[in-house]
Image: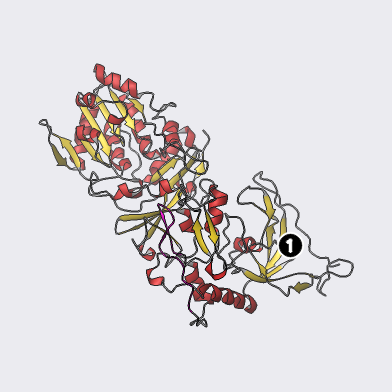
Amino acid sequence: MSATAPTESKPAESKTGAPPVDTITIKIDGQTVSVPKTMPDPLTGKPIPTTMIQACSMFKVDVPHYCYHPKLPVAGNCRMCLVEFGTPAMGPDRKPLLNPDGTPKINKSPRPAIACATPISSAMEIYTNTAGATEMRKAVLEFLLINHPLDCPICDQAGECKLQEYSVDYGQSQSRFVEEKVHKPKRVDLGPRIVLDDERCILCSRCVRFTKDIVGDDALGFVNRGSYNTLTHYPGKPFDNNYTLNTVDICPVGALTSKDFRFKMRVWFLKETKSICTSCGTGCNTVIGSRENLMYRYEPRENDAVNSCWMCDYGRLNYKWINREDRLTEVRLREKNGTYQSSSWTAALREISDKLNNVPKGSAAIIASARQTNEELYLLKKLADKLGAITDSIPRQGAGDKLLLNPDRNPNTLGSQLIGIAPKQMGSNIPKIADGIREGAIKTFVVFGEDVTKHGIDPTLLRSLDLLIVSEILPNETTALAHYVLPGTAHAEKRGTFTNIKGRVQRFIKAIEPKGNSRPEWEFLHELVFNVTGQNGFATIEGLFNQMAAEVPAFKGLTWARLGDLGASVPF
């Protein structure tokens, strides 16, 4: 058999109808692998040559790095990702030279390469764990640590710091540097949400590139030279856009810290739970950090179909209401004299069920918040169908931007419309409900998750009702007038799904326990629907979702298991 040099692979056949992918055969630490010839540019999405570090990442081969980030333009300035490599030897005729066994003869390069910026080529061999590569990383790390302060015990990044981690792998037990360290500005107020410690900065420029290339706000840069290089904001202009806290996430050291989280909790004490941001219709994937039943922070979770790996400051900081002291935590019912008394869930649901069973068909209305889960809206729709109730949801609008923040401030507008609890023009039925109450046609009103007194239904109308049932998390004017108050829970205290504005159904997991006697709305709604309609459903969120998906056409084919951590899209 004649031996030939390896060539680029032919385009792979796609079984899913996706365009074929050109691949290149290379070796990584002796393992032969096929790697896509190109990868999408993180900014434009156009194909660009695959780099060494991307190829290594595909096969779980760790290449240490600081300045490289897969979602940012390449800078190539930290040199931590240096690797050794070899390419096919070429003869005088510019044809590859072959070994006796027919494999290409590899010439090892006398110089290393930065893996983040060096494209792969056919038959290339990459060596990431040689003695030479290890020594280079040790030298780079030694230079980075020359002026770095030894303040890990008081640094917020401790436990998440790449400088700490790589110091364990490549650091020395003691420093050879005997001169005075360079001292730089500390506790610099960069803007309303960010504090900078310039002494910790390793000049990776991740924050500069993110702010300029992703956000479009060229607000950060370096000044001075050499050892006195420092990060700063544009003179006279505080670092204040809606995405500043992402720079804390991508900072590989403790230079940039969040004022909201600074000195609040050691990260290794936090329990991390996969969740969804509920501040707008985008539905950014998040991680909730909590401890001892308190939520301490939101962080973005990567999902290229929704939010890449970013999150806006507005959504990230919209969690403190979950920890508020005035949360509704007890079931309450109003006596005839207007005073309230606490009740048990069993007694309250029995009374409510009895009253709803005697409500004349067509004399009820239901407001179902688009901040409720798909499962809760599905159960409310069953209740509405039984009562012949007029239904609606409250529209909630705000300023949006071109990146992630959507003008629709409800996390589940599309879900409420697909399930049928909200009309296409959300809010259009509210005047009808108000008129119905005013004329005496509507005597029973069920409100979930909204203060309707702020949305066109006057308190005097609520006082005229025979039965006002309200489920809420925080007290408001509507809860103050209710005959029954059913304390609900925040998304961090339950499980369920939302459908974002692009039709992606995503699930979230419970991070903390409900406050007091509050319960997830889907749990007591399941019981209420059974008592009123006689339709028994699933007592687990998984079964309830699967039942909903089987009955609601828009969710056909979905299952809880199929959603996974990243969700699934539905047509709309």
Query: Element at badge 1?
Result: loop
Percent coordinates x, y for residue 142 in the rendering: 54, 76
Does residue 458 lie above or below 27 as drawn? above
Residue at image x 31%, y 35%? 450
Q: How many marks?
A: 1
Do we see residue 459 in this rendering?
A: yes
Residue at image x 38%, y 41%? 544
Q: Main secondary structure of the magenta part?
A: loop
Residue type highlighted by circle 1? Ser
Which residue is identified by label 1? 121
Asked if the stretch drawn in magenta spans residue 8, the answer is no
546 on left or right of 79? left
Work out whether residue 518 or residue 299 is closer to the camera in this orientation and state it.
299
Work out whether residue 242 or residue 498 is closer to the camera in this orientation and state it.
242
Asked if the stretch drawn in magenta spans residue 186, the answer is yes
Percent coordinates x, y for residue 164 in the rendering: 47, 71
10 on left or right of 489? right
Percent coordinates x, y for residue 453 in the rendering: 27, 30
Does residue 266 lie above or below 179 as drawn? above
Residue 112 placement: quadrant: bottom right
Percent coordinates x, y for residue 85 in the rendering: 70, 71
Q: In the displayed image of the protein, which residue is found farthest to the right?
A: 93
Q: In the displayed image of the protein, which residue is found farthest to the top?
A: 439
Residue at image x 37%, y 45%? 541
Quarter containing the N terminus: bottom right
Q: In the displayed image of the protein, which residue is found farthest to the left?
A: 337
Work out whether residue 185 or residue 117 is closer to the camera in this orientation and state it.
185
Question: Circle 1: is it few (<14), some (14-19), or many (20+) Cα within 10 Å?
Answer: some
Magenta residues, start to end? 180-197
Work out whether residue 531 or residue 404 is closer to the camera in this orientation and state it.
404
Residue at image x 79%, y 72%? 105
Does residue 265 lie above or below 469 as drawn? below
